């Protein structure tokens, strides 16, 4: 490594620190990085938690259905159907009652709505977590943190958690399953136990944004706790579709919650919160042919991720925490997460998530996403280079 | 007209009443009508308030920039930039400070945010109006209606309005300029007078969603009150881009408001509320070449609308109220608005807005939008047929 390169890395370090500061607790998007740091080139975006094979599939449908037929104009020109009309397609896709479905402009809009409108005085959050869960609370809501421990591999102990919640008289809890940023997975059995034990709570928010990447059986069939809404009206199941379907730019998400909660939200807003393109996505989401093809690319990506995590785990001087998501939390030994992050980017064009701003993580952590088979090979090789 | 046709019209009447009931105080979208009432065919959507020539222009840019280049994938796959990054483009386009700009998933999201978060105990609304302004209020906000009179041609008298607001101790007011559903336009001079007289109010919401269709000079140059934010920090200027740019399905809007208000909203939500496609729109919105072309189609459409309203006005047995928007409020003599609406649809395939559900309107009113030159000819001919 020559002196110029070292100097450039120092400069970049300063520029990145500034950019990260501007982006708050979320990573700057690739588009923002390209625009603000023109010298940087990203070859593999391993910060981005999305199935690239699913994007291919969506694009194939979009081209056939909208571009080749010239129907794209209708999708862009006209008002999309209202929220409750779009929910019909989701109802068909997931089998839940339409009255229990709230459609969101991405899961993030739903998280904001639920936290602003339904959470009461005390919300229990499991950390480390996705920061919006505590950043979006109202000023009059107290956030209580339940910390997962490194020593336990960031695995949640259901009974300890239940006791903590009961002892602290919280009204609402949020569980991301699998959790972000570590990918820790709570089995449906454990989740059922928690929900049954805490049925007196006002709200149990289950964020299943990464659940399509998890599995309990060898056939990798899809898991969800959505049907529990029939028995527990305090459940709010939040579902991003950005990750599993590879369409973050479309902004599509939904939640399953009690009919009362859906009514409350719709009586007072969220009229045309879904774009024409998101409405188109929800339509194909309810089509059997699309779902059959989707499950092929979903399973392909899971197998891909499994191989990737195994290879990552074999590298010395880093620890890969157990994950059933499409990423892993990686702890570094002998170097800071920021240096590792910058080395990967500058030397190999691989962009990962430096977790130094995540509350509840002490140590040097990065989150690395699984990408395509070819990209994962590049990530592994870049990590090996940075570690050595 | 044979008996079958009459029977079918009766059936449709029942089906429409049901559909309208389901859609609340907003018209069912064309897509919803097509889906739920397969027998109905719409030739001209004169309910839809949008410049079709601007849609053509946007599609031309989109095809060249995204489809031909294969960049559409990036727009759909990746997270769009965060709210405050997108606002840079709007800042460049309109010349306001970026810190005063809040980007919305359509103006409707901004209306909801402003009414939920900034309006206090008493909001004054001018009726007839766009229903979300009163439907979205919190339960603890009282809505006070200032009624425009048919006898005054639904023209707002600034001094009477100022007195009414002062006498009733409201904290916030909302003015749509030009107003929806009548298109009544308040000159910048009158608006300035109102704003200066009511500078003690907490919030003055000015909705300029239709302002690109208004004009004060013969050269039809664009009007806006956005620059007044420099002198009046209580101003909130809401701007839909669906109508003027013909892109309702994209969901794009913004507001100009005090830096404090923007900070309040962004500190607690609205992180990725703009889709990749809306972000693309905002980019071209800041490009000079696009705006030059846009102003050509804007002026073409205004001229078109002027001719259309003149022709409409010449038809006997209906009254066209003064409008500087892309639509007019039309009062019918000797027939109900619902019968007129259904006649237009069934006999001519022309879909207009029956205003019988609009509060503040007593009488038989429909709102008719201006469309392309060719479509406007069809509307005129359909109206003549229905009236005779």
Image: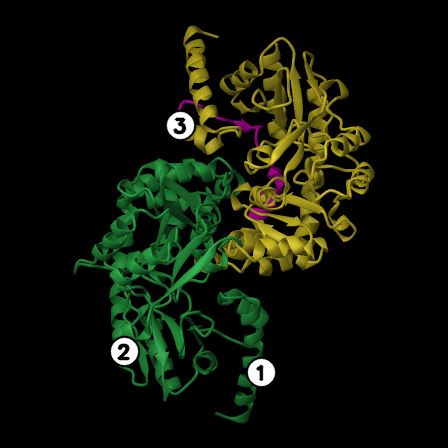
Chain colours: A green, B yellow
Percent of width and height locating residue B111: 60, 42
> N-terminal of the two: label 1 or label 2?
1
- In the rendered image, which residue does mark 2 sit on? A313
Percent of width and height locating residue A277: 45, 46
- Frontmost residue, B153 versus B303: B153
Q: Are marks 1 and 3 in contact (CB under 8 Å)?
A: no
For the question of whether residue B165 can be seen, the reply is: yes
- In the rendered image, which residue does mark 3 sit on? B36
Q: Residues within 10 Å of mark 1 (few under 14, many from 20)?
A: few
Q: Residue at x 49, y 32 (%)?
A: B29
- In terms of secondary structure, where does tag 1 sit? helix
- In terms of secondary structure, where does tag 3 sit? helix
In the rendered structure, which segment of residues is drawn in magenta? B37-59
Q: Residue at x 40, y 30 (%)?
A: B35
Mark 2 belongs to which subunit? A
Mark 1 belongs to which subunit? A
- In the rendered image, which residue does mark 1 sit on? A11
Check if mark 1 and mark 2 are on a common chain: yes
């Amino acid at each position: 490594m020559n002196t110029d390169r070292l100097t450039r890395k120092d400069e970049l370090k300063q520029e990145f620190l500034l950019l990260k500061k501007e982006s708050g607790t979320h990573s700057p998007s690739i588009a923002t990085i390209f625009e603000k740091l023109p010298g940087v080139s990203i070859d593999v975006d391993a910060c981005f938690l999305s199935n690239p094979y699913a994007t291919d599939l969506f694009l194939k449908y979009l081209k056939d259905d909208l571009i080749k037929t010239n129907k794209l104009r209708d999708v862009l020109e006209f008002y999309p159907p209202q929220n409750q009309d779009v929910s019909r397609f989701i109802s068909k896709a997931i089998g839940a009652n339409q009255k229990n479905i709230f459609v969101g402009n991405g899961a993030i809009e739903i998280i904001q709505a639920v936290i602003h409108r339904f959470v009461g005085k005390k919300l229990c959050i499991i950390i480390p977590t996705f920061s919006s869960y505590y950043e979006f609370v109202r000023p009059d809501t107290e956030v209580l943190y339940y910390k997962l421990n490194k020593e336990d591999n960031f695995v949640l102990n259901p009974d300890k958690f239940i006791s903590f919640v009961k002892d602290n008289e919280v009204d609402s809890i949020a569980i991301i399953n699998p959790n972000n940023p570590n990918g820790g997975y709570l089995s449906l059995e454990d989740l059922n136990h928690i929900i049954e034990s805490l049925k007196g709570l006002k709200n149990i928010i289950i964020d299943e944004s990464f659940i399509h990447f998890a599995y309990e059986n060898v056939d990798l069939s899809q898991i969800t706790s959505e049907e529990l809404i029939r028995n527990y009206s305090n459940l709010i199941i939040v579902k991003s579709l950005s990750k599993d379907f590879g369409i973050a730019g479309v902004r599509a998400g939904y939640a399953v919650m009690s009919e009362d909660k859906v009514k409350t939200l719709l009586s007072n807003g969220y009229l045309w919160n879904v774009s024409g393109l998101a409405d188109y996505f929800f339509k194909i989401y309810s089509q059997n042919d699309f779902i059959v093809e989707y499950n092929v690319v979903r399973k392909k990506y899971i197998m891909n991720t499994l191989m990737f995590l195994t290879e990552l785990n074999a590298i010395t001087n880093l620890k890969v925490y157990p994950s059933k998501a499409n990423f892993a939390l990686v702890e570094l030994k002998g170097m800071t997460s920021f240096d590792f992050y910058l080395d990967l980017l500058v030397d190999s064009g691989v962009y990962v998530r430096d977790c130094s701003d995540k509350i509840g993580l002490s140590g040097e952590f990065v989150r690395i996403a699984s990408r395509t088979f070819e990209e994962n090979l590049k990530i592994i090789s870049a990590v090996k280079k940075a570690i050595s």
